């Protein structure tokens, strides 16, 4: 392992990379002309004291921290893997609180931490706090809703909020999710979908229907953001 890689995998290296990444996100936010649709959705729900589950595709997560209205901090589900650790260090710079685990395969995840993470997330939501999730992370497939998000909404009663935040100018990486690196001095779009609730007592068929409904809703706000920016058909 080279010196650079060892530094990036060290605690100090991850902290420094996270700090620099957060500063870059702030630069993008300040130099972008934003269009917002559905901006009333989150503040309206949070004002009632209700916890919510904002969801965003893994490829568009970069600018997610700037959209959270507060006043309570947002919890965020992140993986225990290397990229998840780097993402968590950046998100912490915005006052976000990390929950380690995955909802990728609800009820079937070989990672024993998945069950503990679900319990922790349920406790967070039931006390009126909120937790953000990338429903196709950390392993994909890209833009495919996990069953875990539906289980979380079903058991907690908290509404799911589809969210997309992106910029017209960006670099797309050749990764499993086609991750988008936003570039400065651009136009941007923030689109918030209407809340979706999931009934607590549903059978497997109804749960799959709910999963498809939420996936379609997140794809719809993604398409709406891309239409606003004139980037339809440019990938995930």
Image: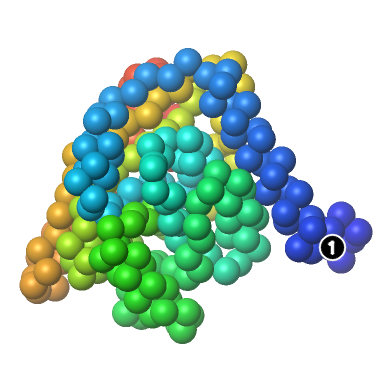
User: Relative to 111, is 13 above or below?
Assistant: above
Residue found 39% across the figure and 42% down from its top: 70
Q: In which quarter of the image is the N terminus?
A: bottom right
Which residue lies under the disc numbered 1? 6
Residue 211 appears left or right of 91? left
Percent of width and height locating residue 45:
22, 43
Percent of width and height locating residue 91:
56, 49
The secondary element bearing badge 1 is classed as: helix
Q: Which colour scheme is used?
A: rainbow
| The one of 172 and 202 positioned closer to us in this rendering | 202
Percent of width and height locating residue 234:
45, 30
Using the rendered image of the protein, determine whether residue 176 is visible from the camera's viewpoint.
yes
Residue 82 appears left or right of 137? right
Percent of width and height locating residue 124:
34, 65
**Crowdedness near tag 1: few (<14), some (14–19) or many (≥20) residues, C-alpha within 10 Å:** few
Q: Quadrant of the C terminus?
A: top left
User: Relative to 93, is 208 above or below?
Assistant: below
Residue found 40% across the figure and 25% down from its top: 189
| The one of 67 and 87 positioned closer to us in this rendering | 67
Q: Residue furthest right?
A: 3
| The one of 62 and 217 positioned closer to us in this rendering | 62
Using the rendered image of the protein, determine whether residue 144 is visible from the camera's viewpoint.
no
Residue 178 appears left or right of 206? right
User: Relative to 195, is 105 above or below?
Assistant: below
Residue found 87% across the figure and 55% down from its top: 4
Residue found 37% across the figure and 29% down from its top: 190
């Amino acid at each position: 392992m080279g010196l650079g890689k060892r530094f990036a995998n060290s605690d100090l290296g991850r902290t420094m990379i996270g700090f620099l990444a957060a500063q870059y996100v702030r630069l993008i936010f300040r130099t972008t002309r934003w269009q917002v649709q559905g901006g009333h959705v989150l503040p309206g729900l949070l004002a009632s004291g209700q916890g919510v589950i904002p969801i965003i595709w893994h490829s568009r997560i970069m600018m997610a921290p700037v959209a959270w209205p507060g006043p309570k901090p947002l919890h965020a589900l992140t993986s225990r893997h290397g990229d998840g650790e780097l993402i968590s260090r950046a998100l912490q710079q915005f006052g976000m609180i990390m929950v380690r685990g995955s909802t990728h395969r609800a009820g079937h995840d070989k990672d024993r931490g998945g069950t503990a993470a679900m319990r922790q997330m349920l406790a967070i939501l039931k006390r009126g706090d909120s937790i953000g999730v990338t429903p196709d992370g950390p392993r994909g497939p890209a833009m495919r809703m996990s069953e875990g998000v539906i289980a979380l909404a079903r058991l907690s009663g908290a509404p799911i909020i589809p969210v997309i935040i992106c910029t017209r100018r960006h670099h797309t990486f050749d990764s499993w999710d086609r991750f988008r690196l936003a570039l400065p001095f651009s136009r941007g779009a923030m689109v918030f979908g209407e809340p979706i609730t999931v009934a607590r007592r549903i059978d497997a068929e109804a749960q799959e229907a709910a999963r498809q409904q939420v996936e379609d809703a997140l794809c719809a706000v993604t398409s709406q953001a891309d239409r606003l920016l004139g980037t339809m058909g440019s990938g995930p």
